[in-house]
Image (spheres, rainbow, N blue to C red):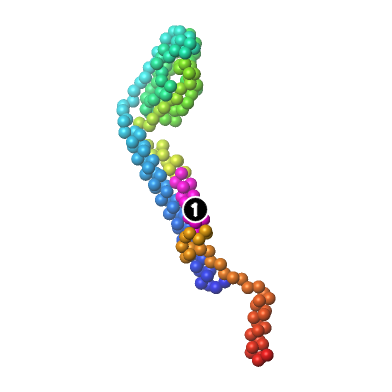
């Protein structure tokens, strides 16, 4: 292999590495920017923390079992971070909301955070389950940090692989193609040496 061929190949690999890093950084910045805009829009209607008190009257469990909704709880219950939910259970049976358990004649307070949201079994709703939607109150980069870096890296790698596949199929610049240097067999070298010797001897 000639020195120039080896040097060209090293430069090509270096440029591919630089391109890969730039694609990962660029995709991460793009996804982070879009996520930040979405989070700002999502928290635009923020308000002061509030306390929501639900009084579970005696006999509520019987009405709920009959398909009624005496507590007027929606199937998707929306809150903001730092809100407080108070369940005042005056019924003669315990009630649950996900992992939260309220025995009879007991008052329990629950501080709400986005991590506590989800779809849960709930004895307070006639369907037997509700979605607890707890939205962030203010802009918090920690909420989008993991998705930003995770998706940004993944998208960058996918773009890098796609770019190299495209070049390998001949769609890219020839300057980035792998250098292919023909390798001579030993018998070819011997034949050339013999021909050169014969020419010198005038045979």
Of the pair 83 and 15, the residue shown nearer to us: 15
Residue drawn 52% across and 59% down?
168
Within 10 Å of disc 1 (Cα), the crowding (few <14, some 14-19, many 20+) is few
Residue drawn 47% across and 26% down?
119
- x%, y% of residue 201? 66, 91
What is the secondary structure assignment of the residue under circle 1?
helix
Q: Is residue 152 magenta?
A: yes
Residue drawn 65% across and 82% down?
193
Task: Provide the major secondary structure of the magenta segment.
Answer: helix
Q: Is residue 23 above or below residue 127?
A: below
Per the rendered image, the range of residues in magenta is: 151-167
The answer to whether residue 4 is seen in the rendering is: yes
Quadrant position of the N terminus in the picture: bottom right
Asked if residue 126 lies left or right of residue 197, the reply is: left
Q: Is residue 6 magenta?
A: no
Residue drawn 50% across and 68% down?
8
The answer to whether residue 88 is seen in the rendering is: no
> Disc 1 marks which residue?
162
Q: Is residue 32 above or below residue 119?
A: below
Count of marks overlaid on the render: 1
Quadrant position of the C terminus in the picture: bottom right
């Amino acid at each position: 292999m000639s020195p120039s061929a080896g040097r060209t190949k090293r430069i090509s690999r270096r440029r591919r590495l630089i391109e890969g890093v730039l694609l990962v950084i660029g995709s991460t910045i793009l996804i982070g920017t879009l996520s930040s805009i979405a989070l700002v829009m999502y928290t635009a209607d923020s308000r002061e923390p509030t306390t929501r008190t639900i009084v579970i009257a005696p006999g509520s469990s019987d009405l709920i079992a009959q398909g009624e909704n005496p507590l007027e709880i929606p199937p998707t219950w929306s809150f903001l971070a730092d809100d407080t939910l108070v369940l005042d259970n005056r019924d003669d049976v315990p009630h649950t909301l996900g992992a939260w358990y309220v025995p009879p004649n007991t008052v329990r307070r629950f501080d709400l955070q986005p991590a506590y949201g989800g779809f849960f079994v709930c004895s307070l709703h006639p369907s037997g389950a509700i979605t607890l939607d707890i939205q962030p109150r203010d802009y918090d980069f920690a909420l989008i940090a993991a998705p930003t870096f995770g998706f940004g890296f993944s998208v960058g790698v996918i773009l890098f692989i796609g770019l190299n596949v495209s070049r390998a199929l001949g769609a890219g610049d020839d300057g980035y193609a792998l250098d292919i240097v023909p390798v001579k067999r030993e018998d070819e070298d011997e034949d050339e040496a013999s021909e050169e010797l014969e020419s010198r001897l005038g045979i």
